[in-house]
Image (cartoon, helix red, strand yellow):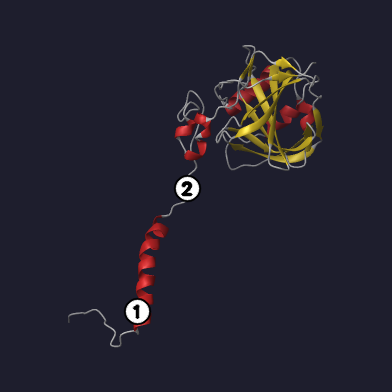
Amino acid sequence: MQLTAYTPSIAPPPGDAMLARHILLLSTLLLPGIAHAQPQKPVIWGYQGGGNDDEGWGTLSHDFITCDTGNNQSPVAINEPKQSAMPPLDVHYHSATMSMERKDRTIVITMTGAGYLEDSGKRYKLIEMRMHSPAEHEVVGEVKPAEIHLIHKSADGKILILGIFADIRAKENPALQLILDKAPAKTGIKPLVTFNPADLLPESKGYYAYTGSLSWPPCTEGVEWRVMKDDMAITQGQMKAIGKLLGRNARLLQPLYLRPVKQTLN
């Protein structure tokens, strides 16, 4: 038996027919886009020496274009800082229990409830900590073995990053050891760690200051940097553990152009 398509015996009123055609046209336009919509995949990026390295982050995603086109990028070489009567570093950190995870080619600690920093009358809440090996900033031709970034955010969304160099000494840093003992070896794990960020700071609180960017994608500019002159002491064993955990995750130095770099008097 031959099958034929069903044809309604009663035609819809003219107004309804027009509405039906509009609905059909709209569905034809929208459904292909809905059918083909796919969750956006994360952009894979890396550092010099590997694939998708930091010399071409801006080519990997439109969101990363500032990495290649920005004129106020970080990190930079600090060679001739100008002395300035800047106020002492005003930190108000305290012990807290925080989660850590492997993210953005480093260990990221979410610094919930760990305090704040005040700079030029503005309060910046401590929100995150990251580690880099070797150090990202260079000071008069010297690159330290590692650098820790304490990332702060003000109520109006401004970012201030406090950079702390790490250098090898005979004495172990207990706060860093707590982090290394619990640092996750793979993604998807978020162990808790309790420590006081103040225990990562060197005794001398002098610092360099300049305006730059995030040193990882999307390389957002307008970031205030405070890089401590002195370094925190770590042992050779701790440095080996950092290297094993992170590999190389320091961005290439970026042009300073005409940006001023200041330093405290002490």
State if disc 1 and disc 2 touch (CB < 8 Å).
no
Give the residue number, with chain letter if any, for mark 2. 40
Q: Nearer the viewer, residue 265 or 116?
A: 265
Q: Rounded to the nearest whole Å, what is the CA distance between mark 2 and mark 1?
A: 39 Å
- In the rendered image, residue 211, in percent from the top left (x then y), is placed at 65, 27
Give the residue number, with chain letter if any, for mark 1. 17
Residue 246 can be seen in this image? yes
Left or right, 5 with reference to 183: left
Which image quadrant for residue 60?
top left
Which image quadrant for residue 202?
top right
Left or right, 131 with reference to 39: right
Q: Nearer the viewer, residue 59 or 180?
A: 59
- Rendered-image quadrant of the C terminus: top right
- Nearer to us: label 2 or label 1: 1
In the image, what residue type sits under mark 2?
Answer: Gln
Which image quadrant for residue 180?
top right
Q: In this view, does 260 lie above or below 126?
A: above
- Furthest-front residue in view? 258
- In the rendered image, residue 39, in percent from the top left (x then y), is placed at 47, 51
- Furthest-left residue in view? 1
Q: Which of 202 and 260 is in front in this view?
A: 260
What residue is shown at x 28% (from left), y 87% (from top)? 9
